[in-house]
Amino acid sequence: MKKLLLGLMMLGVTVPLMAQDIELSEVVVTPVNYKYLQSVDNQQAAVPVKMLEQKVANYDIKHSDIYDDSYDTYTVSFYIPDGKIVAAYDKDGNIVRTIEKFENTRLPDAVRDAVVERFPNWVMTENAFKVTYHDKKGMNHKGYKITLMNGDQVVKVKVDQDGNFM
């Protein structure tokens, strides 16, 4: 029994010493739709917004069921309970344009501070975050539509991402 245990222990020590070095081929990581992600750059956006935008950027249209070489653009809708994104992709899988709308998301600090400063003693009852992105025009518009209530009074305001009222 003693020899068996000693033998197993020696085997356990020598086997890892005989491990082989395996060289793997080089892996190249390329950013998918990085222009879109840089353009919408929502650092202070709510987690569901960031997650859905990341999913849109990483979506591979070429491996989807609707892909066919004969079409120039493809429209794909992404839904979560808090909002949706409708994205148009070209035949190479690049995002051409998006329309995004999210309900009752966390407001960025600049927006929240601007609303509180202009409307003290008002309570926010709901909000909508809207984003439009267009690749060719280089256009990206982000805005918030906020419903405020003070007693029986109701006010709807529009604010851009920097806290400027429109």
Image (tube, rainbow, N blue to C red):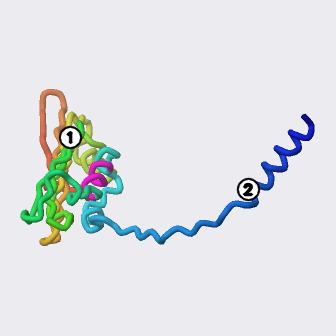
Between disc 2 and disc 1, whose residue precedes? 2
Quadrant showing the C terminus: bottom left
In the rendered view, tell whether residue 20 sits above or below residue 103: below
Three-letter amino acid code at disc 2? Pro
Q: Residues within 10 Å of mark 1 (few under 14, many from 20)?
A: some
Disc 2 target residue: 16
Q: Secondary structure at mark 1?
A: strand
Q: Please tell me whether residue 76 belongs to the stretch shown in magenta.
A: no
Residue 143, x across and y down, in percent: 18, 53
Q: Secondary structure at mark 2?
A: helix
Three-letter amino acid code at disc 1? Glu
> Which residue is at the far right?
2
Q: Please tell me whether residue 52 belongs to the stretch shown in magenta.
A: yes
Residue 114, x across and y down, in percent: 26, 51
Residue 154, x across and y down, in percent: 12, 34
Q: Residue at x 52, y 67 (%)?
A: 24
Which circle, 2 or 1, is nearer the viewer? Answer: 2
Residues at marks 2 and 1, CA–CA distance in whole angstroms = 56 Å
Q: Give the magenta range.
A: 51-57
Using the rendered view, name the quadrant where residue 122 is placed: top left
Disc 1 target residue: 103
